[in-house]
Amino acid sequence: MSSLPHTAPSWAVRRTRLPLIGLECAVCPSDRLTIGDGRFRAVSDGRLFSAWLLVDCVACGQTGKLRVHRRVPVRSLPADLLDGYWNDSPSLAVETLLDPSFAQRNRFELDWDGRWELHAPPVLEDQGPLRIAVAFDDPVPVRPERLIAHGLGISRGEVVRRVEADVPLKRRTKQGFSFVLAEPDL
């Protein structure tokens, strides 16, 4: 057998639903919000523009808002972006929600639990070492060690013994990576 790794089909981490927003509701004790239908609240006096993404509590349904823009000059924003805010563009709402600077500015984290899945073709291990690339369609924070164990159906201990990755295995990542799977010890 060759000692050079063979390239296996790529894996993909894809969202199944939009993540929840980890932020306290103003009315009830819930700490999970959703963007619901992806609506915006936009106001302008012709010179300055402000926009908020409307969010709903998953427990009581109370509507709140998260700041997107606050009193920015109208001319500083592209016309298609302004149209998206005025017309409640669902794709703009998703793009805004997944923007890390939006989350940081509004002091929340996205809750991805149960809202993503791994698309991993079956791996044939009898070919010797395998190189597998993992791509992320959305910034889902996962530990490579757990993701690889789930995709290969092996224990996390075996992942540590058999896998050499280009990212730390035990630290969360939101970006694509690749790893080499060594042959099992007999």
Image (cartoon, rainbow, N blue to C red):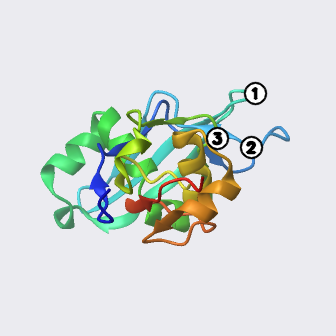
User: Sequence-wise, which precedes: disc 1 or disc 2?
Assistant: 2
Identity of the residue drawn at 85% across and 41% down: 29
Q: Residues within 10 Å of mark 2 (few under 14, many from 20)?
A: many
Residue at figure coordinates x 40%, y 48% from the top left:
138
Q: CA distance from mark 1 to mark 2?
A: 9 Å
Vertically, is 75 above or below 116? below
The image's mark for residue 60 is 1
Disc 1 + disc 2, Cβ < 8 Å: yes
Q: Secondary structure at mark 2?
A: loop
Q: Is residue 107 visible?
A: no
Q: Nearer the viewer, residue 125 or 2?
A: 2
Q: Amino acid at mark 1?
A: Cys
Q: With 128 as the anchor, is 149 left or right in this view?
A: right
Residue 107, position in %: x, y?
62, 64
Residue at 21% over, 42% down: 83
**Residue at horizontal 34%, vertical 46%?**
127
